[in-house]
Amino acid sequence: MTDPPRERTTPAVRPYVITRGRAGAEGPPLPWETLVTAAGVPPPDSLLPEHLTILRECRGLLSVAEVAAYLGQPPPVVQVLLADLAHWGLVVLRPPVPPADRTDATMLRKVLHGLERRL
């Protein structure tokens, strides 16, 4: 009698294989809240399956963290893959708004309360 095959508990392909041994992208790492969208350029045939999955998922705006969740890969791996795609012109990256440029939440609350009083 043979035992049933065991369920795989680790990914079939290790992250360092997907990134071809690179631990980080060239330049500063992409913040997890950076928004990504596909550029609409036809991809070359030489792309990895993970690159193609990213392009398929990024038809709308997704954050780096969301792309990592869809791929089931750690965010640092996805950061490297996204940097590749950006370098090749296949995705457009929108960096997060710096904290100094964000609208003050206190001001927004005052505006909201003022509008509520008028209604």
Image (cartoon, helix red, strand yellow):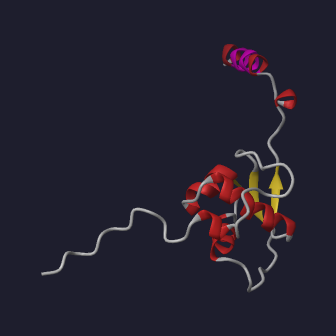
In the figure, residue 37 lies in which quadrant? bottom right
Say which residue appears at 82% left-offset and 38% top-offset: 97
Determine whether 45 is above or below 51 in the image: below
11 sits to left or right of 103? left
- Is residue 113 on the magenta stretch? yes
Determine whether 32 is above or below 18 in the image: above
Image location of residue 92, percent across then percent down: 82, 61
Image location of residue 99, percent across then percent down: 82, 29
Image location of residue 101, percent across then percent down: 87, 31
Quarter of the image where the C terminus is located: top right
Say which residue appears at 71% left-offset and 44% top-offset: 33
Say which residue appears at 74% left-offset and 15% top-offset: 110
Q: How many marks?
A: 0
Image location of residue 3, percent across then percent down: 19, 75
- Is residue 78 on the magenta stretch? no
40 sits to left or right of 15? right
Quarter of the image where the N terminus is located: bottom left
29 sits to left or right of 118? right
Determine whether 57 is above or below 118 in the image: below
Q: Nearer the viewer, residue 72 or 66?
A: 72
In the figure, residue 46 lies in which quadrant? bottom right
User: What main secondary structure does the magenta stretch of the protein show?
Assistant: helix
Q: Nearer the viewer, residue 33 or 37?
A: 33
Say which residue appears at 81% left-offset and 70% top-offset: 90
Magenta highlight range: 108-115
